Structure formats: structure tokens, C-alpha cells
Amino acid sequence: MTHPNQSGAVAGPRRKLRRMRVLYYNGAGGLEWRDEPEPVIRSRTDALVRPIAVSTCDLDQRVIRGAVPLPGVDAPFAIGHEGVGEVVEVGDAVTGIAPGDLVAIPYHVSCGICDRCGADLPLYCRATAAHGVAAYGIPFGGGYGGLFSDLVRVPFASYALLPLPPNVTAIQSVSVGDNLADAWRSVVPHLRRYPGADVLVMSGGTIGLYSADVARACGARVVHYVDPDPDRRRIAAELGARTSAPEEFEPSAHEYQIALNHSSGSGRALRNAILATAPGGYVESSSFYFNDIELPLPTMHMKGIHFSSALSNARSHMPEVLNLLSSGRLHPELIITDVIPFDSADQAIPTAGYKPVCVRRSSSGIEET
């Protein structure tokens, strides 16, 4: 299949090459700004975007704290893949967005027209991910850089970038391109199948909190949130969930039609999520596991449990997530732990809470807080 947005002459005059700052994870638990050339429009459907609100995802937090044996993580790499930006420049084949628009950015790069994108699998796009994941802010992402940058190039911009609804702020939508989309896909399709179902959330970070918020907003009868962190349990309670610490949770006490494992790699949490699932129920796991773990397969087999463990194909779900945000039924602002000036990201993020957002002003002069 030919992808015209990867070929053809670049329209318009090229800007004089300038320098910019890019935030790097240094491979040893710290962050540092580096000086690099600004990206330029390379093909007719590229856009250049200036990030104005960027956050760390749960995986970033684990990387910074040295808890992830991710390939390439022991060497420096540009960090950041959750963010909202202001469009600065577009190629002459870009439609639907224009300079000055505030847009949500998916963490992965995809074309939107191949068979995998059409099957809601844009993470595995044939145009960009033939030899691995194409994404921002991870060490094996294909060289697209990170969103903690002064400027990023977004290929296939007409498909990738989604304008923010006028009543949704950059901070509210900062995680639409990753964690919030991941939360949405893990629970909403199942709630549509089983309206009013009970939902269990085994959590170890912000995806769990987003999932509890989405489940409540989309009609779950009971949301039971389990997390070792008392501050996250407090926020979950504010979002309308029943809460427990892991040592208080008994999987045989109640059956859940939908069980979510966002526990940041806890084997016990995954096992308990499966054991608490009702016959014919669904278990969704977004957690990274870097070693084989034992699953209660006899229980899964006898109860006919549907089990899925997957990365998020975020772009497929972003329109519905933005619509849900625009409805006012979600409260992601309660989950943000820190709002930090963009220039302070290198010093502030390592000591901030589990969901910091780094912000700067858009060209309109309005700080998106």
C-alpha cells in the first residue's frame, strides 16, 4: 500500500534551522535538558507542534524510579509521550487542523489508512511500526523524540492530532493520548456489553484512577478500587469508588463482571483480579510484566473468563475520550498531583507526585491551567 503522506515534496519555504531544548532521561535516574536541532516538516502531511502541557505516564514514573528493565532504558533517551500541544506549522496536505489549534497528541505514530489502523490497531500501523513500536518518549520508539520538547514533528497529522473541545483544558486532556485512553478502552466496551456491571480496579498508579473515574461516569453500579497508596485511595473515594488496601481485599467476597489490572506489575493483584471475576466476565490488564508469572488457569477455564493483556491503541479511542471529557462527567483534574512550569521539569519531576503536569503558555498568552 502506498502512503502518500510519507512521500512527495514538502510545501512552502523551509524555516531556518534553529535549536531547541529536549528533556532526556539520563539512564541513571535523573533528567536533563539537552540542546538539539528543531524538527522540520519532512512530508506533506506532517505538522510541527509545540507541547504546552505534558505529563509522565505510569511507565515513565517507574523508569525514573529505576523499577523497569525496559530495553534501552539504561542509556539516555528523550522522554515524554503524554501531552497536548499548539500547532505551529502544517504541510500542505494537512486538513482539519491549523496553526494555533490546541490538539491532543497520541503517544504512538500511525497512518490512519492501513488495514491495521482500520482495525483499531494503530499501534501496529504498517507504515510506521513494521520494525517495532513507533512512539514518542520511549527508548525503542523509532527516533521520534519526546514530548518534553520545545517542538515535535507529528507525521500523518490529519489523522493523529485531535483539536480540543472548547470547554476542555490542556491539563484536563493531558493524558488523552495514553493513560486516559487506556483506561477508557479497558472498561467502556465491556460496560456497553453489560450496562451497570460491577467493576474491580486493581491499581498501582494513575491508569487505575482514570479507570475508576471512567467506570463511574459510564454507569458502573459499583466501582471497587484497590491500591496500596492511601492518597490514591482518597482520590478514588472522591471519584465515587469503594476503596481497599491490597491486604484488605478478599477476592472471594464479591464477583465482578469487569476486573481491571492496572497494578504496575503486581502478580498478586493480577491473580486476585482473575479470582474475583464472575463467570463469563472480563479481565483487562495494562500492566507491564517483565518475567513470566503464574496464572490461576484452572479457575479461568472453569469460569469461562475472558482475559486480555495489551498495550493501548490510544488513537482509536481518543475521539470518544474527548467527547466524554467535554460532557463534564469526568474529573481528571482531581488526579493531577502537581502543576509545574515547563522549564522546571528536569528538577521538579523526580521529586513530584505520581501525576505531575508541566505547563507553559500558548501563543494566545493564556496558560492552559
Image (cartoon, grey):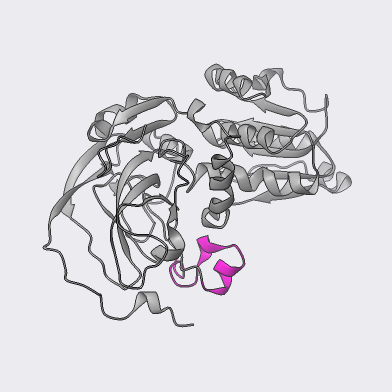
Query: Residue 119 at x, y = what percent?
Result: 62, 67
Q: Residue at x 52, y 56 (%)?
A: 315
Q: Is residue 121 magenta?
A: yes
In this rendering, position of residue 130 left or right of residue 35: right
| Quarter where residue 57 is shown | top left
Residue shown at 47%/41% (left/top)? 175
Q: Position of residue 92 (x, y in %)?
A: 31, 72
The secondary structure that dominates the magenta segment is loop
Q: Quadrant of residue 260?
A: top right
Q: Which residues are magenta?
A: 113-132
- Picture coordinates of residue 215 (x, y %)? 68, 36
Is residue 290 in view from this perspective?
no
Image location of residue 286, percent across then percent down? 59, 44
User: Which residue is rendered at x = 12% and y = 61% of the image?
Assistant: 17
Give the quarter of the image for residue 23.
top left
- In the picture shown, does residue 10 fall above or below 39? below
Q: Is 227 on the left or on the right of 84, as rendered?
A: right
In the foreground, 254 or 330: 330
Q: Is residue 267 magenta?
A: no
**Residue displayed at 53% across by 74% down:** 114
For the C terminus, the quadrant is top left
Q: Is residue 9 above or below residue 82?
A: below
